[in-house]
Amino acid sequence: MKIIRNIIALVVVLPLLAGCQDFFSPPLENNREKDDIYNDPSFAQGILGYAYAMLPYSNTSVTDVATDDAVTNDRGNSYLSMATGSWAVLNNPMTRWQSGRAAIQYVNVFLDMADDITWAKDEKIHAMYADRLKGEAYAMRALNMYYLLMNHGGWTSDGKLLGIPIVDEPQDQYSDFNVPRNTFQECIDFINADIEKAVELLPLQYENITSAAQIPAKYQNIGITNPGDYNRVNGVGFTGRIDRRIAEAIRAQANLLAASPAYSEGTTVTWAEVAGYAATVLDRIGGPAGLSPTGGTWYMQTEEIKNLGSGENPAEILWRSDRDDDVADYAIGITQEKNNFPPTLYGSGRINPTQNLVDAFPMANGYPITDQARSGYDPNDPYSGRDPRLSEYVIYNGTRYKGAEIITGAYGTDNNALNRESTSTRTGYYLRKLLREDCDPNPQNNLSQWHYTVRIRYTELFLIYAEAANEAFGPTGVGNHGYSAYDVIKEIRRRALQIDEDPYLESIKNDQDKMRELIRNECRLELCFENFRFWDLRRWKDNLTETARGMEIDRRDDGTLEYNPAWR
């Protein structure tokens, strides 16, 4: 098939990846002929760089306001419009159709020419470069296919589960664009096939080796004997690009989607397969024993973030963006804080957690608040004795933050109070998760701090495993992997609740339905405000129209507080 003769206006963002040394470096605008690409590997990598520049990850919490976990005080927010009945073609903030298919087009162009580009004069080095870059491209295509499926796949009125049109060759002006969608299963098969190719071509991770014995056999067989030659192509300097572990994690995510209740009747993916895909990645860090002790508050580990080396990942993070501490509006160095700090701290208070979410946090002893007898929950003192994650993720009435007491109750005397002005909370809560308390949006200071965007956390993979293992083997069954859904959830709750004994978990560990409910709740809590909730509800066929609730707090004449859950 013909390749596009002119690739125009290819804009590549250079600091795409933490630690990348061979940045993509074509000029900002290129009017280049096809033949130029074959002799200019930097320009050729720019084509793949477009897909990296269009990665489908947000550095802000956005989609949660379309769920029962949050609302926003920004009345013009497109996700708010979507959540209140205006989700339509002309208002679809979830769409990935244009960006995802554009990324796949660039990947296809790259793959079509990759073997013919002169990556290095030495044929052996050329072969390693071609392998690695094609591996990245196959994984990138699978990633975009997964997000397109998640956003645009679904059932037809006549009972067919369709995905998107599979396009595996570059398209040009002569291509036939009027092609039907492939089935959902065909799309999953295509994703899995691309991941298999990526796994075959990519290094497990980018690291420098020190001896010839560490060179993979396939490269020893073509005459690579110098560790320096291997490191030139697959060394630690390329950390941040897709490696084999990341590709395998994408496979687990895509197959989780296919096995979920919303899609399982139209696919052949089994829960056991999903558990196996997640375990492939998790086994390398020791299974549940490898869960990072600070993984639930990765965004609060200020010294860890400050001291991260180029491309280095904390124990919780499998894949992340580069760090940023810029104060510009397009940067992430202080943007979340400007948007979400309470108004007295020079923020706009945009994302307001709901009472629905607050009620999902158990008590510190692990019992849900609905089990009042054993949990000890007091509706007249609702924030005492709760799961520590509540105070780590949510600012509630009376929270001390940045040295000040934040009063969100209706009795408050400043703009932090409920519905006081356009930047005040609508629910009685402000966002705390993802924010750095040491940022200062005061225009006189405008002090930013290091942030990075998380792309894949190990906790997400543990939760994928727990969900799949519970469905495949029951709560305590281990399959072929040596650990169960119960084992995983026990470690996640041990980290969160900071308790060794978890009587509630023990009471349900032999009940698959109750374990399912608990796993889904742990997904809700651990991943809140990281743009998971909407898609989880959708794939679980759960209620996407649950009314969001807030908390109105008034002061009685005797000085005590009255708590009134309110519909928002």
Image: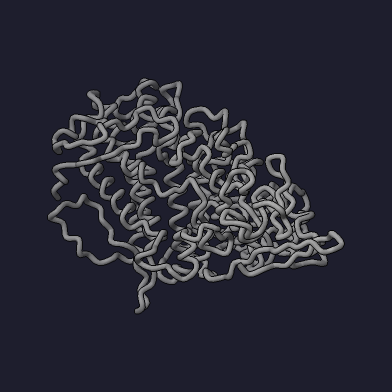
Left or right placement of residue 286 versus residue 502 in this view: left
Q: Nearer the viewer, residue 338 or 34?
A: 338
- Vertical relation: 24 (above or below) 152: above
Give the image location of residue 55, x and y in percent.
39, 46
The residue positioned farthest toward the bottom in the image shown: 158
Camera sees residue 377: no
User: Residue at the spot x=21%, y=50% of the render?
Assistant: 170
For the point 48% across and 59% down, the residue is 256
| Residue 410 or residue 498, whichever sits in front | 410
**Place of residue 382 in the rendered image (x, y in percent of width and height, measured from the top left):** 76, 60
Residue 308 shows in this picture: yes
Image quadrant containing the C terminus: bottom right
Quarter occupied by residue 474: bottom right
Q: Name the side, left or right, on which 427 lies relative to 183.
A: right
Specify whether 57 is left or right of 26.
right
Residue 262 horizontal/vertical position (percent)? 47, 69
Rendering colour mode: one colour
User: Is 104 left or right of 382, judged from the image as shown?
Assistant: left
Give me the residue at 48% from left, 41% from top. Answer: 319
Q: How many numbered callouts?
A: 0
- Which percent across, then down, holds residue 28? 26, 34
Query: Where 257 sits versus 400, above or below?
Result: below
Above-or-below relation of 418 to 310: below
* Residue at 54% over, 41% down: 317
Q: Nearer the viewer, residue 328 or 255?
A: 328
